[in-house]
Image: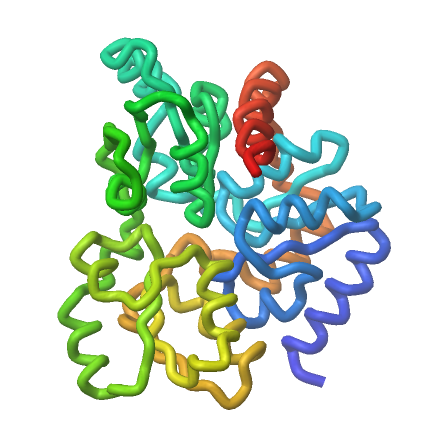
Amino acid sequence: MTVTGTLQDKILALKKQRNAVILAHNYQNAEVQDIADFVGDSLELVQNAAKTQASVIVFCGVHFMAETAAILCPDMTVLLPDEHAGCPMANMITGEQLRAKKKELPGVPVVCYVNTTAEVKAESDICCTSGNAVKIVESLPDNEILFVPDQYLGTWVASQTKKKIHLWPGFCPTHAKIRPEDIIRLRQQYPEAKVVVHPECRPEVTSLADQVASTGGIMKYARRDDVHQLIVGTEIGILHRLKKENPGKLFIPVSIEASCPNMKKITLEKVLWCLQEMKPVIKVPEPIRLKAKASVERMLAVK
């Protein structure tokens, strides 16, 4: 038996003993995705976990994702296998900074990307995901919106609506590595291929794509019968799931440099350790949790 196989067996046994559910984001290492009960985007994962009878969530992702699980599943113990797995974009805005910006724009509603801390969610009017951001902005009666923290997702939303969008200067360093010249080169190399990119990419990248989509949207697009070769502009961890679920199709990353170092901090060894030690536990103070939960629930209420 391989070392990986032994680790997997230990994790599965301990998971059963702890009554735990293992969630893995689409950007996780392949072996971590393979041990998970659910693989997907952050909100989808939390919603799936909430439907289970588990007592413990092991969230294989970054800190804000585990926080979101703690916000929506307060009766479950939420573990993050590496407490240093943070999100640079989420850290580009604080609750204090958002409060100051709101004073500059009195009465302007705040739409926050789910890729934010609990404190920022608590200071926002409504949350959004990359998949529903346009719908959420359109659902608001106001003609002006403050969108935080991702300026590129916000720019994409602004291109799809007539509303005035005030942008916060945050961004995802991993998606910023995806360059338009790489897409142009790959289109020449693979003339039959479609191009799909994440809306966290720069505008000069999204403008070259056949489809701009969230990770869930990318998975859906890849299943289309008319897609046989796909140039993929997002974090490269998603390629494992794309290949696994679409055998016979060719998937080409726009850039192998688009690898999130924080996502890759989660390993099988750390998953096993956190189940053994039942830590690090991610908690959100109750006053912040309730306000953040209201922001997420307003989003979920939009049909």
Instruction: Where is residue 239? Give x, y as percent.
Output: 45, 73
Tell me where residue 208 appears, x and y as whole percent.
21, 65
Spot the residue most to the bottom. Answer: 248
Q: For residue 174, which quarter of the picture?
A: bottom left
Give the x, y percent position of residue 130: 42, 47
Residue drawn at point x = 72 percent, y = 38 percent: 77
- Rendering coords of residue 203 (x, y %): 20, 53
Reply above or below: 93 against 209: above
Quadrant location of the C terminus? top right
Q: In the depicted view, which residue is nearer to us: 72 or 221?
A: 221
Quadrant assignment, res 38: bottom right
Check the image and report above or below for 74 versus 186.
above
In the shown orientation, is residue 238 left or right of residue 255? Answer: right
Q: Residue at x 22, y 35 (%)?
A: 169
Q: Nearer the viewer, residue 115 or 76?
A: 115
Which picture quadrant has residue 13? Answer: bottom right
Locate the N terminus and report the quarter of the image it occupies. bottom right
- Is residue 133 something one can see in this rendering? yes
Q: Is residue 129 above or below residue 294?
A: below
Q: Would residue 67 be seen by someone viewing this image from the given angle?
A: no
Instruction: Please tell me which residue lies in front, 119 or 180.
Output: 180
Residue at 57 percent across and 41 percent down: it is 66
